[in-house]
């Protein structure tokens, strides 16, 4: 299974670059990392962040990796070819994938209460920063 992964800020910068300097009518695909790269990097970062993980105490997290057969009818490739974006527009990811993955993982480790609420469904009952705005006058 192949999929592309890209830090959201890099994706936004790619879209902005296409809008600014891309040729009208052209198609530019945006993408970067692959699944196995993501999993390998994440396992290594978890070894550093959680050496005593209850899921893999004192062992490399890569031992938890399991390759499974694709589901029947499932697409085997979700990757794109971003060479045109890179060569014609000079775009490349600005963010270091590993450091952003590290920051994301640290955030999840520091927000375990939120993660547990998402997993048990109770987070659905909480709508943060949500207020009902009155309809502008004259509009129905």
Image (spheres, grey):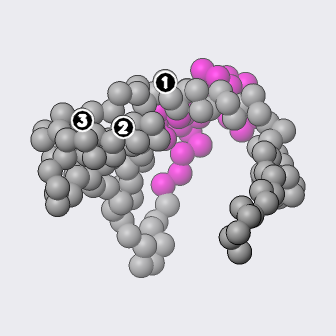
The percent position of residue 26, horizontal first and vertical second, equals 16, 57
**Disc 2 + disc 3, Cβ < 8 Å:** yes
Q: Quadrant of residue 72?
A: bottom left
Callout 1 environment at 10 Å: few (<14), some (14 to 19), or many (20+)? few
Task: Looking at the picture, tell me which residue is in the foreground, 62 or 110.
Answer: 110
Q: Which residue is mark 3?
A: 91
Q: Residue at x 48, y 72 (%)?
A: 71
* Mark 2: secondary structure: helix
Of label 2 and label 1, which has the lower sequence position? 2
The percent position of residue 121, horizontal first and vertical second, equals 82, 58
Q: Residue at x 65, y 27 (%)?
A: 106
Q: Which region shows up in magenta?
A: 38-67
Q: Quadrant of residue 34?
A: top left
Q: Which residue is mark 2?
A: 13
Q: Is residue 111 visible?
A: yes
* Mark 1: secondary structure: helix
């Amino acid at each position: 299974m192949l999929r592309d992964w890209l830090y959201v800020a890099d994706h936004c910068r790619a879209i902005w670059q296409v809008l600014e300097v891309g040729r009208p009518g052209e198609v530019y695909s945006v993408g970067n990392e692959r699944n196995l790269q993501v999993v390998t990097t994440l396992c290594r970062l978890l070894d550093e962040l959680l050496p005593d993980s209850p899921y893999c105490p004192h062992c490399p997290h890569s031992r938890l990796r399991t390759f499974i057969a694709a589901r029947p009818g499932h697409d085997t490739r979700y990757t794109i070819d971003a060479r045109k974006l890179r060569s014609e527009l000079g775009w490349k990811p600005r963010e270091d994938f590993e450091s952003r993955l590290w920051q994301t993982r640290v955030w999840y480790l520091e927000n375990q209460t939120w993660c547990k609420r998402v997993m048990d469904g109770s987070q659905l009952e909480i709508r943060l920063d949500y207020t009902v705005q009155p309809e502008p006058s004259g509009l129905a």
